[in-house]
Image: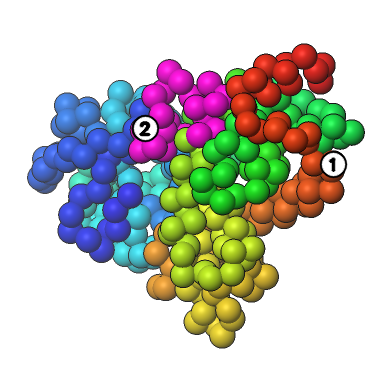
Amino acid sequence: MAGCADQKAGPVVTPWGEIDDTVDVDDEFDLTEIQGSGEMILLTLTGPQYYYDYRGRHLGTQYLLAEKFAASLGVRLRVEVCRDSADMAARLEADEGDIMASTEVGRLLASPAKEDLARELKAWYNPKLLEEVRRQEAYLLSSRSVRRRVFSPMLDSKSGIISHYDGFFMEYCRPIRWDWRLMAAQCYQESTFDPQATSWAGARGLMQIMPATADHLGLARDQMYDPEKNIAAAARYLNELEHTFSDISDRRERTNFVLASYNGGSFHVRDAMELCQRDGGNPHQWSDVRHYILKLAEPQYYNDPIVKHGYMRGTETVDYVEKIQQRWDTYRSVKTPRQGFSDNPRKAHREHNKYQL
């Protein structure tokens, strides 16, 4: 994503990832040249009806429409986010983009210098497309878009056994000083203990790790469904987030920020912290910051100059943190596993497999 105020072109956003190549345009750069270059530039705003980042993927009504139009032309889509509608219109008029997201939801506008592109866009567009992309987005944002089996949240409460993977939680939480039951609660929220869980966005395995995050953590993509390796990588990521929020001295408070960042991204959480501090709240206290996580879904907040990363689906992130905390409270009340249970996590994992869920 690149700001339109910046003269540098941003990365190319495609369904297959981001590409950093760019092309030069001139007054004759119309439909044929766009198709020849392989990319089309969309000028847009941030927000739910326009364009936003969701767990490493790109959504927004206008973005999804533009993506479909680009696909119909056989080109990839590059996105540039503008400051406001006036900036967006000025950029289109100056031919610094090919199409722009209209403030009228469901409409895309072509640059006035590109007559062939404008005709193609008009011929392609059908009002039914708007409802189609809205249904598509609603599905992608729902739990139905995650393929997973729903297992019991407690395997054997009498023995203090939460899941088949408790031994791994214990082993990999010990070095990062996390309560293994907290990671178990997070795992259930992510995948309901299904090691084969997969989301539409590409998150995989018990801890729903994204492919790009797996690359960063050194987890081979062909091993993302391996329970132990997935949990180990997630623990490394949690440890990174712990260091990211090392300015929060209270460990219990910091845990909430780490969980929120695992779900919604640390950059959005930092935006909320900045807003909270500006308005006189305590940016290191979750009860204060959670309100601004929610407010990042409101235009007056996500368009505020202090916010660097735009719109956020804050209700999902706040709900994520609260559900994990509630389940953690439940898990902490169960009987402690037998002595020596965590000495051999792989043996414990094999023993757990004898239980029927």
267 relative to 65, above or below: below
Q: Residue 174: percent from the left, percent from the top?
A: 57, 44
45 relative to 42, above or below: below
**Of the residues under marks 1 and 2, which one precedes in the sequence?**
2
In the current view of this chain or complex, which residue is farthest to the right? 158
Question: In this orientation, does residue 44 appear?
Answer: yes
Q: Secondary structure at mark 1?
A: loop
Q: Residue 215: percent from the left, percent from the top?
A: 36, 33
Corner quadrant of residue 298: bottom right
Q: Please state which amino acid type lies under the numbered disc 2.
A: Gly
In the current view of this chain or complex, which residue is farthest to the front? 339
Q: Main structural element of the magenta stretch: helix, strand or loop? A: helix
Residue behind mark 2? 218
Disc 1 to disc 2, C-alpha distance:
35 Å
Colouring convention used in this rendered image of the protein: rainbow
The residues colored magenta run: 208-232
Corner quadrant of residue 231: top right
Q: Residue 61: percent from the left, percent from the top?
A: 52, 44
Q: Is residue 147 left or right of residue 158?
A: left
